[in-house]
């Protein structure tokens, strides 16, 4: 039986995937509306940039669920040919590397977000949207992906301990 922490992180990842799907739906609806609005002769200026913000945010928010469901692109040729007793430890090492990368990128994204917020940076478009919400998607999404890596490592470590 998986620990409550692993189940809770999986539920959080699933909730993030639902939010990401809604963000994509909103982006699609805004772009569709924009096309009809322009077809009627009106001018638009914020829809494309807003939709890009939504798509980037959805990409980062969907990342933990993608990891939880093994949807990430992985190079598993080595573990496929290794004996089973070596395959799981190699998977754990790969997960630790993935965790380290996510933690580093979440940290760098948080610094970038705080910098943009402190300087009140905006996009160069007519809309002049603040940049920090777009940048915030990176530390939030990758921070949650790091949390999902911790849950995966816990699950795999418990499975490895159960095999012995």
Image (cartoon, rainbow, N blue to C red):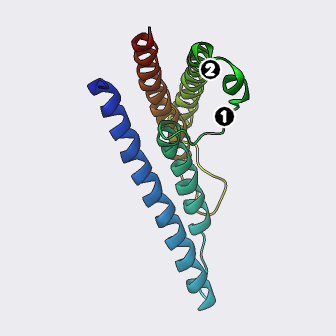
Query: How many numbered circles are shown?
Result: 2
Q: Which quarter of the figure has residue 38?
A: bottom right
Q: Nearer the viewer, residue 59 or 117?
A: 59
Please give left or right for residue 35 compared with residue 161 in the image. right
Whole-Å distance between the Cαs marked 2 and 1? Answer: 10 Å
Label at residue 74 = 1
Please give left or right for residue 149 compared with residue 49 in the image. left
Residue 90, position as x, y percentages in the image: 62, 16
Q: Nearer the viewer, residue 87 or 36?
A: 87
Measuring 48% from the left and 44% from the top, which residue is drawn there?
61
Q: Are marks 2 and 1 in contact (CB under 8 Å)?
A: yes
Q: Residue furthest bottom?
A: 40
Please give left or right for residue 74 compared with residue 14 in the image. right
Residue 5 versus residue 134 in the image, above or below: above
As helix, strand or loop, the secondary structure at mark 2 comes to helix
Measuring 47% from the left and 66% from the top, which residue is drawn there?
26
As helix, strand or loop, the secondary structure at mark 1 comes to loop
Residue 140 versus residue 50 in the image, above or below: above
Residue 80, position as x, y percentages in the image: 68, 27
Label 1 neighbour load within 10 Å: few <14, some 14-19, many 20+ = few
Q: Residue furthest left?
A: 4
Measuring 59% from the left and 75% from the top, which residue is drawn there?
44
Q: Nearer the viewer, residue 143 or 156?
A: 156
Label 2 neighbour load within 10 Å: few <14, some 14-19, many 20+ = some
Dot 2 corresponds to which residue? 94
The N terminus sits in image quarter: top left
Measuring 55% from the left and 61% from the top, which residue is drawn there?
50
Residue 97 versus residue 161 in the image, above or below: below
């Amino acid at each position: 039986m998986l620990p409550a922490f692993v189940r809770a992180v999986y539920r959080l990842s699933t909730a993030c995937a639902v939010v990401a799907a809604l963000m994509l739906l909103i982006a699609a609806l805004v772009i569709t509306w924009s096309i009809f609005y322009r077809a009627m002769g009106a001018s638009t200026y914020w829809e494309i940039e807003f939709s890009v913000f939504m798509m980037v945010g959805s990409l980062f928010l969907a990342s933990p669920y993608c990891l939880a469901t093994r949807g990430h692109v992985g190079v598993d040729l080595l573990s496929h040919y290794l004996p089973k007793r070596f395959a799981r430890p190699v998977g754990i090492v790969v997960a630790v590397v993935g965790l380290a990368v996510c933690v580093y990128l979440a940290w760098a994204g948080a610094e970038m977000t705080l910098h943009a917020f402190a300087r009140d940076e905006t996009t160069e478009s007519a809309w002049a949207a603040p940049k920090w919400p777009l940048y915030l998607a990176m530390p939030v999404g990758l921070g949650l992906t790091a949390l999902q890596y911790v849950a995966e490592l816990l699950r795999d470590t418990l499975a490895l301990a159960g095999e012995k």
